[in-house]
């Protein structure tokens, strides 16, 4: 059991998130069955997995857990951009890929045109965040303002007069899932007109923001979780039910309650829907208890954990 306490800045409530991770016995039981000769083909052999660069730091430990659990499988891990991962998946070159985004419109159109289907297993819910140095004079913003800024309809310094100079926006490369989710989740496929300073790795984005004042970075919560040099902007928005959600601390508890606007799924996409080595790899990463606990400790929401939320007023 893990207990977390958050002070909501907008209301004088102490919100207690009691997170219960239940034993996921099915995945563990399946692995026990692999000892028989019948399952030698999925308990040994070779498997190639493409992992997008944005997720490598997070899931490298989970992949190592898989390798320790299945030492007879030779796992070839290839770190590529999000675009490259989707390319080899859709072309049928990849048995499995790890990605933090869904299909882009052009990818979706190709799948429909050629009647291609790629099954997916969800491992966790993460969040696309806007983050700054701790000394940046901005804590909260809303989704409409972000869209106006990214479409170049307004400048941040015009909305928030505490800025004398327009802040610089920083993001991972145009082939990254962060950039894709900026368009998918934030702009909802509207045109991005704002200039972004882009880098080739997640770490480069974070380091740049840490070392440069007046910058706003785009990243995932899992990438910046626990970093005391930066803060994530709290974002108000209107949810799918038309309700105005006030800015909340960017935290897994609020992701769980859908009180944050830009929630993305971390998934393992498969070439085919059958119980082969790739299928059991995806099952391990998405359902295995040790991985689910690990993802919880990394500040995001594991897909197959069970949660109980209790809210107590002061």
Image: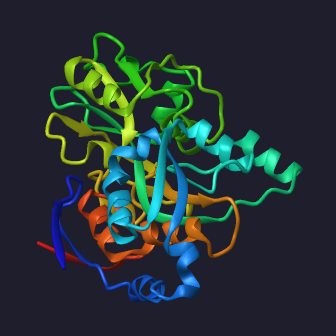
Q: Is residue 158 above or below residue 91?
A: above
Residue 238 visible in the displayed image? no
The residue shown at (30%, 55%) is 61
Left or right: residue 185 compared with residue 143: right
Which part of the image, by quadrant, shows the N terminus? bottom left
User: Observer-nearest residue: 87 or 301?
Assistant: 87
Q: Give the residue furthest to the top.
A: 165
Residue at the (57%, 65%) spot, across then down: 278
Where, by quadrant of the figure, is residue 227 drawn?
top left
| Residue 202 vertical placement versus 64 (above, below) | above
Query: At 65% from the left edge and 34% from the top edge, which residue is drawn?
Result: 190
Location of residue 65 by image quarter: bottom left
Residue placed furthest toward the right: 113
Residue sitting at x 33%, y 61%: 254
Q: In the image, is 176 to the left or to the right of 258? A: right
Rendering coords of residue 39 (x, y %): 55, 82
Residue lying furthest front = 37
**Quick check: can you spot residue 266?**
yes
Measuring from the top left, give residue 235's x and y in whole percent: 37, 45
Name the quarter where the C terminus is drawn. Answer: bottom left
> Residue 145, percent across and down?
46, 33
Q: Nearer the viewer, residue 215 or 236?
A: 215
């Amino acid at each position: 059991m893990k207990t977390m306490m958050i002070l909501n800045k907008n209301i004088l409530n102490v919100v207690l998130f009691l997170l219960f991770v239940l034993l996921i016995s099915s995945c563990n039981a399946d692995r026990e069955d692999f000892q028989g000769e019948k399952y030698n083909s999925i308990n040994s052999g070779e498997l190639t997995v493409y992992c997008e660069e944005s997720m490598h730091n997070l899931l490298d430990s989970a992949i190592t857990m898989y390798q320790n659990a299945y030492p007879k499988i030779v796992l070839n891990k290839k770190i590529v951009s999000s675009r490259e991962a989707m390319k080899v998946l859709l072309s049928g070159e990849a048995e499995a890929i790890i990605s933090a985004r869904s299909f882009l419109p052009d990818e979706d159109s190709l799948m429909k045109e050629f009647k291609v289907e790629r099954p997916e297993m969800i491992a966790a819910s993460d969040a696309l965040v806007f983050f700054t140095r701790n000394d940046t004079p901005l804590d909260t913003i809303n989704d409409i303002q972000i869209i106006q800024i990214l479409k170049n309809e307004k400048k941040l310094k015009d909305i928030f007069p505490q800025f004398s100079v327009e802040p610089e926006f920083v993001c991972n490369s145009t082939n990254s899932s962060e950039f894709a989710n900026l368009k998918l989740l934030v702009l909802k496929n509207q045109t991005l007109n704002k200039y972004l300073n882009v880098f080739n790795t997640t770490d480069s984005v974070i380091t740049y923001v840490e070392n440069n004042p007046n910058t706003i970075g785009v990243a995932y919560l899992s990438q910046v979780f626990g970093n005391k040099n930066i803060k994530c902007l709290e974002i108000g928005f209107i949810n799918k039910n038309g309700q105005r959600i006030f800015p909340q601390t960017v935290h897994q508890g609020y992701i769980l309650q859908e009180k944050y606007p830009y929630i993305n799924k971390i998934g393992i996409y498969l070439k085919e829907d059958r119980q082969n080595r790739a299928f059991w790899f995806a099952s391990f990463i998405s359902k295995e208890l040790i991985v689910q606990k690990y993802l919880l400790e990394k500040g995001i929401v594991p897909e197959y954990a069970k949660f109980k939320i209790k809210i107590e007023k002061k």
